[in-house]
Image (spheres, rainbow, N blue to C red):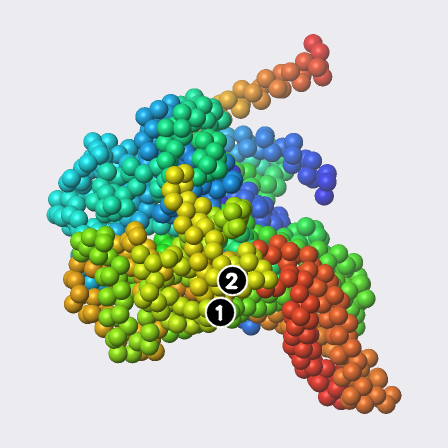
Amino acid sequence: MSINRFFRRGRWDDERARELEAHLAIETDDNIARGMSPSAARAAARRKLGNPTLVREEIYQMNTIGFLDSAWRDLRYGARLLRLNPAFALVAILSLALGVGANTAIFQLLDAVRLRTLPVNEPQQLMEIRIADTTGGRTGQFSGRRPSLTNPLWERIRDRQQAFSSAFAWSGAPFNLTTGGEARYAQGLWVSGDFFGTLGVPAVAGRVLTADDDRRGCAAPPAVIGHGFWQREYGGNPAAIGRRLMLNGHAYEIVGVTPPSFFGVEVGRAFEVAVPLCAEPLSRGERSGLDKSDVWFLAAFGRLKPGWTVERASAQLAAISGPMFQETLPPRYRAEDAKRYLTFKLGAFDAATGVSSLRRNYESPLWLLLATTGLVLLIACANLANLMLARATAREREVAVRLAIGASRWRIVRQLLSESLLIAAVGAVCGAILAQWLSRFLVGFLTSANSPIFVNLAFDWRTFAFTAALAVATCLVFGLMPALRVTGTAPGAAMKAGSRGSSDTRERFGLRRVLVVFQVALSLVLVVGALLFVRSLRNLMTVDAGFRQDGLLVVNLDLGKAGIPVERRTAVHDDITSRLSALPGVTSGAHAFIVPVSGSGWNEKVIVNGARQPDNVNFNGVSADYFKTMGTPMLNGRAFNAQDTLASEKVVIVTEGFARKYFPNQNPVGQMFQVEEGAGAPRPYLKIVGVVKDTKYTDLREPFTPLVFQPTSQNDEPDTFLQVVLRTAAPLATITSEVSAAVAAFSPSIVTQFQTMESQVRDSLLRERLMATLSGLFGGLAALLATIGLYGVMSYMVARRKNEIGIRMALGADRAHVVRMVLREAAILLAAGVATGLVIAVVAARTATTLLFGLQPGDPGTLAMAAGGLALVAMLASYLPALRASRLEPTEALRED
Amino acid sequence: MAKAKDKLAILRGTLDVLVLRSVSARPLHGFEISLWLDEQSEGALEIDDSALYQALHRLEAKKLLQGAWGISENNRRARYYRLTPAGRRQLTEQTNRWDEIVRAVNRILRPA
């Protein structure tokens, strides 16, 4: 069976035809020579040859690969049918493209976030080194995106571990590229010397960092930049190597560039610049964590030695943990914290797919979205199945004839399936194209200025396999059933004149009813889901946060380079704050250690009436006008004032929740309590002078927690960071430029960063916004598809029952009666679908409980709204066919066959 | 239908070698081959033309024959077939095999 011959079979066939013609001609000549008349000669020759077409067919069969040949014919026939029915083709391909596209887009994102391994050498050998069990919490200062370890712990791990051929630690932080004024940040990493070596990442230009670059006390450290950063900031110029790069006010020499595919070890982050860990003090100054055992900011990875397993590595790390934690025990720890610290053990964990906050926050929503789009695709397929069933029924005669003259059932099913496959394939290709656009939109939605998301959305083999599998599955789902149905009828019955085919039997119509009920049920589930998420988002956006969110500008100031000594800092903070508050357009201003909903927090344990309270209490340090600026009402007592200084009695303001919890049934003003400090540290009494309304702390989703506010004027360790909140009605551009000017006038080396409270809150609600938007979109799409399906079935039903309707009208039924009859049919289908859908919805909504706010999954209001809305739309859609039925002329209807 | 098919089935392998023999001396076209076989067998073998053309196609596909268009004696276009070296080898082989088969069958049917 030569492939060559297969592709040339048409030509071979032509040759044979000519050859047989030639044969006939020659034989005719021969016969004439023997004395026959020309017509007799030709007749004799033809009789002897037999049927030339048969010969040609036999030879053609020898040349062809039967299966491929018939498949190709089927596809061409299918294509022609689609061309003749452009409306059907368009609807089918469009609904499939939407379904497949949505699924593929979500899958692509999931693939990038969850499934793909890091683009480094042998990622499956990479393990994360961290404390195995941190229940009970850790104490200290936490910064960075993955604060698993302190530097003293890391240095000991680096020197004493045996399970890894090499290991590295890293910490991610934004690096400011400017030297004063408004900040511009690059995604930065402090990395230990073996970072690039362990990962096996080469340099595409220059060199990468090595262990030699990471020696404590490095004064002129090098920097390695990422490929994208190189393109953006230096235009890809090789002369960038050797240039100076200012990061956080210090100069670094660029020594190399990494390949474009490398993005670090955090999925969803871009890699822009890495500097050695020894350079951390250059940025952080006195806040450097390198020598502090209670500053957690590092994460560590290691590459397993060949032959070692993850269990063996974990065991080895656990064995060396004891002395390590003993040596690094922070002296300021309280007794209980110290006890817990000493029980920590290190362990090794799989890290082939890297680590990711993107994954942590979005993995379950993405799976949920994938399920949603899967349902949308199913609904679209049900629509298509109904459509295909209708078309197949129309071709019943053709199928019957084919069966009668000898086609096997399987052959016809194959032909019908290849039509479905064509639709599925074209739909899938369009869907894949749509998916590219949709997934880029998704990433754009998830990205914000503060935490930009970078995901490599390449169309790799896994996505392709997923799309192809979807195409085949949908083709089978909507194509196989009608094909089997139609070929199942006995040809004789189908061909009987006047027969309406077996689609009208109770049984066949029942199938389409089941499909519609199925569609309605599924789309109800999706509409319920969409409503739940939309209402959840609305709840979050309208929740009482305890302060006024609008018109609040947050200005972050870094005074690190301004060289202000500690004792002058509080005065400087107050000075800056009052200058900014005096700007035109600013109603009031204050500064705070922690701004609400910013992701930062500070908690302590308190001692009330001599009894140590077990729960953590959240703290904040604020200036006098804080509550006025934030719009938090004062319920009792007074605000901080100029009398509260370092020398005077220590005062605090608490929230009503704190007062209720620790001083119930008493007037909290005037009461005292202590903060549990470390061993040997003084524990002054704090007097409550005021009570404010409850306010949210780090997250809008949390319930109100007890809060304690200390005055910044009584802070004996003021920071070089200052966060000013300004209440202003002025437009953003105006106010930011005014603030920048005022700050620069004070000192040009101060770095500023702006954010409005509104956008901060919006960013924190990103996940809920994503779910609400997308599930709303898909829910709407599902409802639309289901309505179209219902409309289609109702129209079909009306068309097929014309006879019956005609008779009824002739016997005296009026228009209204007919409309009622049709609507009753529709209502039954709808009721069945809604009932099934409600049951499924209640069960399915349980999976989304963690993503909802202020709502129970089985919330009856939402269910009622969804069912009511869907029913209304569906009944409207059924009204049209009903109206058409009522408009039939009885004589015309009766004349119908 | 079945009976004719049986006959063809037995003859198919034999028809192939007969066709090879027919063009071993000089190239012939389809009709000429049919005539030649008819003459040489003195009318005993009735060659079905459709079977002949199938055989010709088969042999050409296996590269035992090579076909080319030409002009016949009566100025008609016809496709001439000639033996390739591989075909000649195959002819010798199959002829020898045929002899062996005949000898073996004869030994059974007509024991000496």
Marks 1,2: beta carbons within 8 A = yes
Between A121 and A320, the one lying in front of the other is A320
Dot 1 falls on which chain? A
Whether residue A47 sits left or right of residue A604 in the image: it is right
The residue lying at 59 percent from left, 52 percent from top is A473
Whether residue A633 sits left or right of residue A374 in the image: it is left
Question: For mark 2, what is the residue?
Answer: A668
The residue lying at 52 percent from left, 50 percent from top is A609
Dot 2 falls on which chain? A
Amino acid type for the residue under numbered disc 2? Pro
Amino acid type for the residue under numbered disc 1? Asn
Q: Quadrant of residue B52?
A: top right
Question: 10 Å neighbourhood of mark 1: few (<14), some, or many (≥20)?
Answer: some
Between A301 and A830, the one lying in front of the other is A301
- How far across and down, in percent of the image, does residue A711 sit? 36, 60
Marker disc for residue A636: 1
User: In the structure shown, which secondary structural element does the residue marked by tag 2 occupy?
Assistant: loop
Whether A771 is drawn above or below A311: the answer is below
- How far across and down, in percent of the image, does residue A836 sit? 73, 62
Marker disc for residue A494: none
The residue lying at 55 percent from left, 58 percent from top is A663
User: In the structure shown, which secondary structural element does the residue marked by tag 1 occupy?
Assistant: strand
| Sooner in the amino-acid sequence: mark 1 or mark 2 | 1
Whether A59 is drawn above or below B19: the answer is below
Q: Quadrant of residue A333?
A: top left
Question: 10 Å neighbourhood of mark 2: few (<14), some, or many (≥20)?
Answer: many
Between B69 and A695, the one lying in front of the other is A695
Real-space Cα separation, disc 1 to disc 2, in angstroms = 9 Å
- How far across and down, in percent of the image, does residue A17 sit? 51, 52
